[in-house]
């Protein structure tokens, strides 16, 4: 008999269980602190000047302009704070990346600026203050920016009628995040069918930790989206999904983030399932403060043993609507071969 087996036999099982519990907690705490430090050293907080960090800020503010351009209730002169911040971050990008004119993020932002200017000048709306925020070379470059790289794009219901017959590649490449929908209700049968298909998504050891809350109550939905903060100004969607993960499905301290992995896999599957069934959708993050998290839980009835992964707003495609271009990196930017 090994020493370990002898000790197990001598020590009462209750003490062994307590020891394992304390050990697991210490490991969880230690790993979480290391993860926190790693994140804190890298994320794009104010004052950071790395290329990725600067690009993230440019993309964030350019996307705010894109969202305004794609809004059904287009508001003239919108986005002054975003424009000011974009002006600053574009200057930072020029310093951070000496070859910024070869950077797709630069041209994506300028394409959004180009559309912003064109749409205002087309109706003779004065944006001289906005123009003055950017140096002359930015506006000169914006005239060369490809509209396929940034700004807004039109999506029609007619273009989605045969989605369920498309090969996977075309379905995936044709999907866009759409924030405005037809007033036609989404039925419980449509909701259940979309979720059932998404359940084919893999999870760790097939433990299936994902839980789905399909919110159709407009009062609850309105408050939930106000708390989330990323859907302001848009009409309420016919259905709002909240994806969560049940921590009870995980076994070890080092699985503490697995719910985000499994929840993310499921959420992408749900987005594609909705698209295949002629339903438009837009994912919305749940990266909230503790206070907003608590209010959201109380509002919807989410137990503490589940954590929030993301919302997905969904509805039938409107006959015609706009959405953000949201151009992607070239594949060589993210693909790395090892070996």
Image: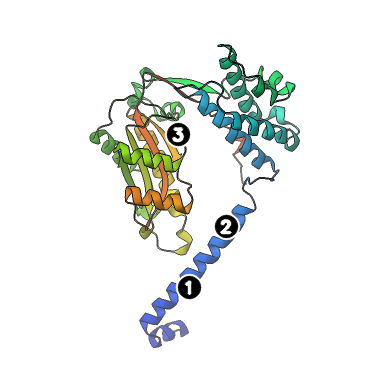
Q: Which residue is mark 2?
A: 36
**Residues under numbered marks 1 and 2 in contact, where contact means CB atoms less than 8 Å apart:** no
* 103, above or below 320, in the image: below
Nearer to us of marks 1 and 2 is 2
Q: Secondary structure at mark 2?
A: helix
Q: Are marks 3 and 2 in contact (CB under 8 Å)?
A: no
Contact between marks 3 and 1 (CB within 8 A): the answer is: no
- Secondary structure beneath dot 1 equals helix
Q: Quadrant of residue 187?
A: top left
Q: Earlier in the sequence, mark 1 or mark 2?
A: 1
Position of 1 relative to 35 (above/below): below
Q: Give the position of the N terminus as an image quadrant.
A: bottom left
Label ID, residue 264: none
Marks 1/2: CA distance? Answer: 20 Å
Q: Judge the density around disc 1: few (<14), some (14-19), many (≥20) Cα neighbours within 10 Å.
A: few
Secondary element type, mark 3: loop
**In the displayed structure image, the side of residue 325 where residue 95 appears, left or right:** right
**How many other residues sit within 10 Å of disc 2, few (<14), some (14-19) or many (≥20)?**
few
Task: Kindly identify which residue carries mark 3.
Answer: 232
Camera-side residue of 219 and 332: 219
Q: Position of residue 36 (x, y in %)?
A: 57, 57
Q: Is residue 315 visible?
A: yes
Circle 3: is it few (<14), some (14-19), or many (20+) Cα within 10 Å? Answer: few
Earlier residue among tags 3 and 2:
2
Give me the C-alpha separation between circle 3 and circle 1: 45 Å
**126 relative position to 16: left or right:** right
| Residue 210 visible somewhere in the drawing | no
User: Label 1 belongs to which residue?
Assistant: 23
Which of the two marks, 3 or 1, is nearer to us in this view? Answer: 3
Marks 3 and 2 sit apart, C-alpha to C-alpha, by 30 Å
Task: Please report whichever mark, 3 or 1, sits nearer to the chain's N-terminal start.
Answer: 1
Nearer to us of marks 3 and 2 is: 3
């Amino acid at each position: 008999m090994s020493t370990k087996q002898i000790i197990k036999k001598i020590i009462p099982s209750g003490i062994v269980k307590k020891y394992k519990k304390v050990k697991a907690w210490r490991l969880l705490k230690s790993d979480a602190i290391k993860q926190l430090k790693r994140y804190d050293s890298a994320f794009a907080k104010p004052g950071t000047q790395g290329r990725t960090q600067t690009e993230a800020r440019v993309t964030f503010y350019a996307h705010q302009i894109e969202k305004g351009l794609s809004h059904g209730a287009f508001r003239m002169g919108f986005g002054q704070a975003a424009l000011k911040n974009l002006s600053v971050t574009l200057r930072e990008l020029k310093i951070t990346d000496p070859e910024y004119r070869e950077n797709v993020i630069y041209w994506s932002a300028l394409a959004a600026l180009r559309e912003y200017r064109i749409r205002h000048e087309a109706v003779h709306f004065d944006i001289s203050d906005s123009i003055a925020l950017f140096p002359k070379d930015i506006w000169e470059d914006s005239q060369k920016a490809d509209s396929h790289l940034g700004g807004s794009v039109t999506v029609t219901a007619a273009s989605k009628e045969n989605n369920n017959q498309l090969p996977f590649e075309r379905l995936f490449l044709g999907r866009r995040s759409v924030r405005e929908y037809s007033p036609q209700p989404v039925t419980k049968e449509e909701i259940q069918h979309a979720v059932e298909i998404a359940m084919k998504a893999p999870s760790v050891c097939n433990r299936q930790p994902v839980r789905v809350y399909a919110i159709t109550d407009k009062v609850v939905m309105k408050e939930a989206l106000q708390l989330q903060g990323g859907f302001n100004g848009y009409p309420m969607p016919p259905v709002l999904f909240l994806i969560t993960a049940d921590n009870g499905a995980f076994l070890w301290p080092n699985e503490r983030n697995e719910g985000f992995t499994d929840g993310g896999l499921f959420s992408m599957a749900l987005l594609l399932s909705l698209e295949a069934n002629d339903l438009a959708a837009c994912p919305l993050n749940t990266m909230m403060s503790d206070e907003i998290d608590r209010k959201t839980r109380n509002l919807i009835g989410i137990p503490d043993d589940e954590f929030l992964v993301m919302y997905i707003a969904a509805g039938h495609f409107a006959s015609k609507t706009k959405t953000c271009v949201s151009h992607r990196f070239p594949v060589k930017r993210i693909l790395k071969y090892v070996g």
